Image (cartoon, coloured by chain):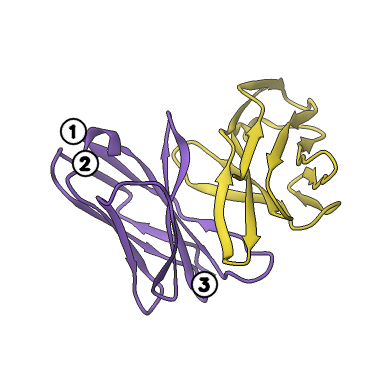
Chain colours: A yellow, B purple
Amino acid sequence: GDSVTQMEGPVTLSEEAFLTINCTYTATGYPSLFWYVQYPGEGLQLLLKATKADDKGSNKGFEATYRKETTSFHLEKGSVQVSDSAVYFCALRAYRNTGFQKLVFGTGTRLLVSP
Amino acid sequence: KAGVTQTPRYLIKTRGQQVTLSCSPISGHRSVSWYQQTPGQGLQFLFEYFSETQRNKGNFPGRFSGRQFSNSRSEMNVSTLELGDSALYLCASSSRQVGDTQYFGPGTRLTVL
């Protein structure tokens, strides 16, 4: 079945450091890929998405590229801020002949950024 | 455009009771999905409704049920609550078009005592 694997956290960084959170997936066909962010006590916010191979999603300085050859969708940011501290979820959603399937999430990676 | 709204935001129940959670999707969205989030199991899919019909269902017992109304608002019900049902219940809406994206509400925090 479809699955998403993302790196264990927490990831602890100093402000202005470079961020990478690894995400790989297993799915048949060409799923859409997403990064969601969850701040304490809140729901999930869509951070960025990519719907086909080689697409780059970007938002608020975060970027991720849909790499079909390595089945990866790693999240990067050049310079993190304290306000980026949150839990980040990688997810995929497949489309089959029965229609859209459920969102499948990774386990989440907690990011802690210190001043 | 208003986002996805969920009511109530917090709920405390005791074992054996039942509970109903409500979700109003983004205007124009006809698909509503429900997810359960717990520290141990992470984010797990419950079910999806589109045009008042259940389209997908996750691997949860029959105590978990849902429905969708003609205005696309959705409710989920959990009967005979167990301690393990304590979780954040998230609702997400989408248009179910190509490039479909699910947008989440703030969730309902259910505590079962």
- The percent position of residue A42, horizontal first and vertical second, equals 47, 43
Question: For the residues carrying marks 3 and 2, which lies nearer the camera in this image?
Answer: 3
Please give the chain letter of the residue carrying mark 1: B
Residue closer to the observer: A32 or A47:
A32
Tag 3, which secondary structure? loop
Point out the image quarter for the N terminus of chain A. Answer: top right
Question: Mark 2 and mark 1 in contact (Cβ < 8 Å)?
Answer: yes
Residue marked by disc 1: B113
**What residue do we see at 41% from left, 60% from top?**
B5
Would residue A59 be found to the left or right of residue B52 on screen? Answer: right
Tag 1, which secondary structure? loop
Farthest-out residue, bottom: B70
Residue marked by disc 3: B29
Q: Quadrant of residue B98?
A: bottom right
- The percent position of residue B67, horizontal first and vertical second, equals 32, 66
Residue B11: mark: none
Would residue B88 be found to the left or right of residue B111 on screen? Answer: right
Residue B12: mark: 2
